[in-house]
């Protein structure tokens, strides 16, 4: 078998390995209403169920990426597949919201082993060749399309099975993928030397989680309480200590010199903001369609099908046009188009969705997929092969931290606007009125405790308030992406890819 054919087989294997990981980033978005009622989860618990996966993974990606550089990407990838499979079984049969949050955390550990290993293997397999953008584009197709079809898979499963099926589906997929990865991937020698310092890893993990907890809680109804301020200070102090150690340690976990390259910094910011906006927007649209318009999970997923189909074409399309028109133009243009589409969706009435809503969704899928692939090219083509694991971990950290923060910030913003907008019917019991105003999920739970007339009045008020909040969130995302387009255009002025042959 020729070397050329073999490397495309390796690419196919690692794309399969990453598919369940990216699907699980979004599969719960469509299941939120069903899951909230089944587990009687509060609005805060729902947010943790969704974004514990992304946030914990964000804290683990750099440590796992550097560990993979030291002990082998193939070995860490295979261990990650096993951990992710067992954690998926635990999640499927979780009896409470707290148990599900814990299972999602275990899934994050497995996923954090897989993602940087996948990107590093792609970088090493294709080197600095002109095929690297195409390879990353194909991987980007799997990543963005997997995230996009997550809601469709979730909707189809919930149409026939209980909510745990959205996790249990990972088990047969993992059983099929594991032997393929084991056979297809070669045993390469490790590309980095030195010890993996667990103390440095813990500083990074706890620091990120403490800051994210402070952001989540600080935006909430409780405001800046003493525990929130202490968590923020702890997180900042731990990350400052982590940076100091990286600058002085003989074998640092993270090469901070990577940030001296403007293309890597721009790529990381792109990954962070685009993933955050996409995750937040997809979650709000899924809830709008089910809560406010009354569609089933499958109907809501089908409504978003243009977004999913657009994502399928964006990745390989990006690989071709980056080579022809240059990374700078493609990256900034894709973000600008995304901003226009988000603004259009924010101004649209989903109750009477016409052709323009379909067009906005499809164009958004293409544009965001191109943008995510462009961020991958900016990062992975700007480092030599021996730093591919660390760079891949940085990129995946941007995706996961962005997705987690996007869900947190957009979710809290949505709940805040919703709480201030909803006009509760008169005569509600004080405690019931208090819980009903926190989030639309809790409003629907409260409505089940009322008579038919009171139930319908409360649901109508909730749907009106949520539609208003939903529009505001989409317009906020549009502004954020437009500002990012300007920054990326300026930051990539002197972008030059690294050629391994020259090193």
Image: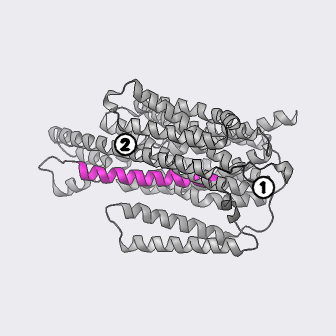
Query: Which residue is pictured at 45% across the width and 34% down the height?
Result: 155
Residue located beneath label 1 in the image: 72
> Would you identify the image quadrant in which residue 63 lies?
bottom right
Query: Which residue is pictured at 25% across the width and 40% down the height?
Result: 464
Picture coordinates of residue 121 (x, y %)? 75, 47
Precedes in sequence: disc 1 or disc 2: 2
Cα gap from disc 1 to disc 2, whole angstroms: 41 Å
Extreme residue in the right direction: 2
Dot 1 and dot 2 residues touching (CB under 8 Å): no
Q: Is residue 165 visible?
A: no
Task: Please give left or right for residue 315 compared with residue 408 in the image.
Answer: right
Taking depth in this image into account, of 19 and 165 the one nearest to the observer is 19
Query: Which residue is pictured at 70% across the width and 52% down the height?
Result: 79
Residue located beneath label 2 in the image: 33
Placement of 91 over or under 159, stated as above or below = below
> Would you identify the image quadrant in which residue 200 lies?
bottom right
Taking depth in this image into account, of 466 and 363 the one nearest to the observer is 363
**Looking at the figure, which quarter contains the N terminus?**
top right
Residue stretch rendered in magenta on the structure: 395-423
Placement of 92 over or under 69, stated as above or below = above
Placement of 7 over or under 394, stated as above or below = above
Picture coordinates of residue 242 (x, y %)? 62, 71
Element marked by disc 2: helix
Element marked by disc 1: loop
Extreme residue in the top direction: 355
Label 2 environment density (alpha carbons within 10 Å; few <14, some 14–19, many ≥20):
many
Taking depth in this image into account, of 267 and 365 the one nearest to the observer is 267
Label 1 environment density (alpha carbons within 10 Å; few <14, some 14–19, many ≥20):
many
**Looking at the figure, which quarter contains the C terminus?**
bottom right
Number of marks in the image? 2
């Amino acid at each position: 078998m020729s070397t050329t054919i073999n490397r495309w087989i390796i690419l196919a294997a690692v794309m399969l390995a990453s598919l369940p990981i990216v699907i699980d980033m979004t599969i719960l978005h469509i299941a939120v209403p069903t899951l909230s009622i089944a587990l009687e989860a509060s609005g805060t618990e729902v947010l943790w169920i969704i974004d514990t996966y992304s946030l914990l993974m964000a804290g683990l990606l750099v440590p796992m990426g550097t560990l993979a550089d030291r002990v082998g990407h193939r070995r860490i990838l295979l261990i990650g597949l096993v951990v992710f499979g067992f954690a998926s079984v635990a999640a499927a049969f979780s009896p409470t919201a707290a148990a599900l949050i814990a299972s999602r955390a275990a899934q994050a550990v497995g996923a954090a082993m897989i993602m940087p290993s996948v990107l590093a293997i792609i970088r090493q397999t294709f080197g600095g060749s002109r095929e690297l953008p195409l390879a990353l584009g194909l991987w980007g197709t799997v990543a963005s399309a997997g995230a996009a079809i997550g809601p469709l898979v979730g909707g189809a499963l919930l149409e026939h099975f209980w909510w745990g099926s959205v996790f249990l589906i990972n088990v047969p997929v993992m059983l099929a993928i594991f032997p393929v990865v084991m056979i297809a991937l070669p045993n390469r020698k490790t590309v980095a030397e030195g010890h993996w310092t667990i103390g440095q890893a813990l500083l990074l993990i706890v620091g990120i989680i403490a800051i994210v907890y402070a952001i989540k809680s600080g935006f909430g109804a409780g405001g800046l309480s003493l525990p929130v301020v202490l968590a923020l200070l702890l997180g900042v102090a731990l990350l400052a200590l982590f940076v100091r150690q990286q600058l002085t340690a003989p074998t640092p976990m993270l090469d901070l010199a990577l940030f001296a390259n403007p293309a890597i910094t721009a790529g990381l910011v792109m990954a962070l903001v685009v993933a955050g906006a996409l995750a937040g927007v997809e979650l709000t649209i899924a809830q709008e369609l089910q809560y406010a318009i009354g569609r089933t999970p499958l109907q809501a997923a089908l409504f978003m099908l243009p977004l999913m189909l657009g994502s399928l074409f964006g990745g390989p399309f990006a690989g071709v046009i980056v080579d022809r028109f240059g990374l700078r133009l493609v990256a900034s243009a894709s973000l600008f188009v995304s901003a226009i589409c988000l603004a259009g969706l924010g101004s649209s009435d989903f109750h009477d969705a016409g052709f323009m809503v379909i067009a906005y969704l499809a164009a958004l899928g293409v544009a965001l997929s191109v943008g995510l692939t462009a961020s991958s090219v900016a990062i992975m083509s700007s480092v030599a092969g021996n730093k591919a694991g660390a760079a891949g971990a940085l990129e995946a950290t941007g995706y996961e931290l962005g997705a987690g923060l996007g869900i947190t910030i957009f979710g809290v913003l949505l709940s805040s606007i919703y709480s201030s907008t909803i006009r509760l019917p008169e005569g509600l019991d004080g405690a019931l009125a208090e819980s009903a105003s926190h989030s639309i999920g809790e409003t629907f739970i409260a409505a089940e405790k009322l008579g038919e007339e009171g139930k319908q009045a409360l649901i109508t008020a909730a749907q009106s308030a949520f539609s208003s909040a939903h529009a505001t969130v989409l317009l906020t995302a549009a502004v954020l992406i437009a500002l990012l387009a300007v920054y990326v255009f300026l930051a990539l002025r002197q972008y030059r890819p690294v050629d391994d042959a020259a090193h």
